[in-house]
C-alpha cells in the first residue's frame, strides 16, 4: 500500500512538471509531491496499525467466546425427572414429590371413633432432594455420587423427623460399570431394595441400583419392617454395594454400630441377589441385626411375572428375634400376593393381600405387637396371632407428573395379636383419595 501511494504522488509531480512554465514552478511542484508522499506514507502506517488492532480485538473476542462455551452447562427438565444441570461429566438434579391425601379411618382412637382428616401422605412421603455425580478423570469411568433427601408433612409443613433435615437420604459414594455402586451414609436398607419388587404392586418390576421402597402411611405398609435394620427401615451409618452382572443384581449391606468398646451392638449385615428376566423377576435377601444386644434375623424370597397387561407379585418372609430369656424368642412367617392391571390409557388398578403370622411376639406397654427389628429388651409380655390386610387402589394419570388416586385397606387381627394402628381393636378400615405431583 505504501508503494502505491508513493507512486501516485510521483505521477502527480510529473503531471505538474509537464505543465510548469519555469524551473521555479518545477521545484515548487517537486516539494509539494514530496510532502504529499510523506503524508501518504503516514496514512498508510496508521491504516496498518488500525488493521492490527482489529485483528487483535477479534482474536480476543473469539477466545472469550470459547471460554464462555467451555464453562457453559446444559439445563433441562424432563417430565417427572426434576430440574437437571449438566456440564461435561458433572450433573446435579433437584427433584421432589408432593402427595396430598384426604382419608377416612375407623377405630382411629381407643374409643373407636371415626376420623376424617387431611392425613400424612398415603402412598409416598412428601419429599425434596438433591443428587449429583462428578466424573473422575483417569479412572476408567469412575464417578463420585451423592444424594440428600428430606421428607416433610404436607398438611402442616412439619419435618417428618423433627430436627433431622435429610432424614430419608444423606450419603456419598462412587460408581462405575466395573465397580458397581458403593455408598456411605444414611440410606435404604439393602433388604428393602431387594424385596420391593414383590412387597407391593407399586414399585419397579426389577431390582435396580436406584433406591425405592414400599408405600408410605397405611395398614399394608407393615411388611417393610421385615426388611429392617438396627435403626428402622433405613441404615444410619450404612455402607451399601450393589452391582448389575448381566441380568443379575448382587448386593451387600453393612451398618456401622460405632459404640466405644463394642463393635457388634447396632450393626446390621445383609446380602441380596436378584434376577431381572424382564417378564419374570425374582429376588431374595438374608438380613441380620444386633438391636440393643438382641439378634434379629430375616430372610425373604419373592418375585413377579408380567402377563399382558397384568403384573402378579408374590413373596415370603421369615423372621426371628431374640427376646428376654423369660419370654423366649419370636418367630414370624409372612406372605403377600398382589397384582397390578394396566390396560393402557390413563387408568391402572392394584389389588393386594398380606398376612403376618406372629408366634410369641413381644408387645409394648399397651399390648401392641412390636414391629420387626424393634428393640425387645424391655418387653415383659408376648402375643401370638395373625395380622391380615386387604388393599386396593385406582390411579388416574394426567401425565407423567400428575395423578389422582382412590385407595382402601382393611386390617384384621386374631388371637392375642393387637396392632397399634387399630388402637386396641381387632380391625380397621381406611379409605383415601389423593393427588400426587412430581417435580
Image (spheres, rainbow, N blue to C red):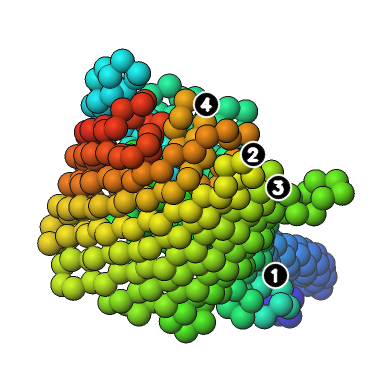
Query: Residue placed at 27% from the left, 39% from the top?
Result: 412
Q: Name the residue under label 3.
A: 293
Q: Is mark 4 on a helix, strand or loop?
A: loop
Residue shown at 57% from the left, 68% from the top = 271
Is 146 placed above or below 392 here?
below
From the viewer's perspective, is 353 left or right of 193?
left
Residue 95, label in figure: none
Kindly report the distance in space between the C-alpha atoms of the residues bearing marks 2 and 3.
Answer: 8 Å
User: Along the polypeptide, which appears first: circle 2 or circle 4?
Assistant: 4
- Using the image, tell me which numbered label, if any, was put on residue 365: 4
Precedes in sequence: disc 1 or disc 2: 1
**Where, by quadrant of the figure, is residue 375 drawn?**
top right
- Quarter of the image containing the C terminus? top left
Question: Mark 3 and mark 2 in contact (Cβ < 8 Å)?
Answer: yes
Between 328 and 344, which is closer to the camera in this rendering?
Answer: 328
Earlier in the chain: of badge 2 and badge 3, it is 3
Where does label 1 land, which residue?
136
Q: Which of marks 1 and 2 is in front?
A: 2
Residue 377: which numbered mark, if any? 2
Bin the neighbour count of mark 3 within 10 Å (Cα to Cα): few under 14, some 14-19, many 20 and up: some
Amino acid at each position: 500500500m505504501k508503494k502505491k501511494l508513493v507512486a501516485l504522488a510521483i505521477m502527480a509531480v510529473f503531471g505538474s512538471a509537464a505543465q510548469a512554465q519555469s524551473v521555479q514552478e518545477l521545484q515548487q511542484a517537486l516539494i509539494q509531491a514530496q510532502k504529499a508522499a510523506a503524508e501518504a506514507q503516514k496514512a498508510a502506517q496508521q491504516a496498518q496499525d488500525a488493521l492490527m488492532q482489529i485483528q487483535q480485538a477479534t482474536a480476543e473476542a473469539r477466545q472469550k467466546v470459547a471460554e464462555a462455551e467451555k464453562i457453559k452447562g446444559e439445563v433441562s427438565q424432563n417430565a417427572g425427572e426434576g430440574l437437571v444441570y449438566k456440564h461435561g461429566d458433572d450433573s446435579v438434579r433437584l427433584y421432589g414429590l408432593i402427595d396430598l391425601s384426604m382419608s377416612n379411618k375407623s377405630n382411629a382412637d381407643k374409643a373407636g371413633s371415626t376420623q376424617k382428616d387431611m392425613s400424612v401422605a398415603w402412598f409416598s412421603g412428601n419429599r425434596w432432594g438433591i443428587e449429583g455425580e462428578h466424573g473422575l478423570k483417569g479412572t476408567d469411568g469412575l464417578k463420585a455420587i451423592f444424594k440428600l433427601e428430606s421428607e416433610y408433612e404436607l398438611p402442616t409443613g412439619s419435618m417428618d423427623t423433627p430436627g433431622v433435615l435429610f432424614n430419608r437420604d444423606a450419603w456419598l459414594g462412587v460408581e462405575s460399570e466395573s465397580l458397581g455402586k458403593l455408598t456411605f451414609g444414611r440410606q435404604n436398607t439393602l433388604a428393602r431394595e431387594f424385596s420391593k419388587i414383590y412387597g407391593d404392586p407399586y414399585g419397579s418390576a426389577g431390582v435396580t441400583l436406584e433406591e425405592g421402597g414400599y408405600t408410605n402411611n397405611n395398614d399394608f405398609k407393615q411388611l417393610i419392617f421385615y426388611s429392617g435394620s438396627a435403626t428402622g427401615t433405613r441404615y444410619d451409618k450404612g455402607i451399601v454395594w450393589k452391582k448389575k452382572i448381566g441380568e443379575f443384581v448382587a448386593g451387600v449391606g453393612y451398618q456401622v454400630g460405632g459404640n466405644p468398646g463394642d463393635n457388634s451392638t447396632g450393626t446390621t449385615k445383609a446380602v441380596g441377589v436378584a434376577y431381572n428376566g424382564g417378564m419374570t423377576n425374582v429376588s431374595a435377601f438374608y438380613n441380620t441385626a444386633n438391636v440393643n444386644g438382641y439378634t434379629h434375623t430375616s430372610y425373604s424370597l419373592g418375585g413377579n411375572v408380567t402377563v399382558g397387561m397384568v403384573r402378579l407379585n408374590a413373596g415370603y418372609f421369615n423372621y426371628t428375634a431374640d427376646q428376654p430369656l423369660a419370654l423366649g424368642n419370636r418367630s414370624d412367617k409372612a406372605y403377600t400376593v398382589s397384582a397390578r392391571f394396566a390396560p393402557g390409557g390413563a387408568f391402572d388398578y392394584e389389588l393386594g393381600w398380606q398376612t403376618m403370622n406372629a408366634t410369641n411376639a413381644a408387645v409394648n406397654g399397651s399390648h401392641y405387637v412390636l414391629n420387626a427389628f424393634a428393640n425387645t429388651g424391655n418387653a415383659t409380655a408376648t402375643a401370638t396371632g395373625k395380622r391380615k390386610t386387604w388393599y386396593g387402589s385406582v390411579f388416574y394419570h394426567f401425565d407423567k407428573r400428575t395423578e389422582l388416586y382412590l385407595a382402601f385397606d382393611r386390617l384384621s387381627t386374631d388371637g392375642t395379636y393387637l396392632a397399634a394402628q387399630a388402637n386396641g381393636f381387632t380391625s380397621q378400615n381406611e379409605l383415601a383419595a389423593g393427588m400426587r405431583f412430581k417435580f
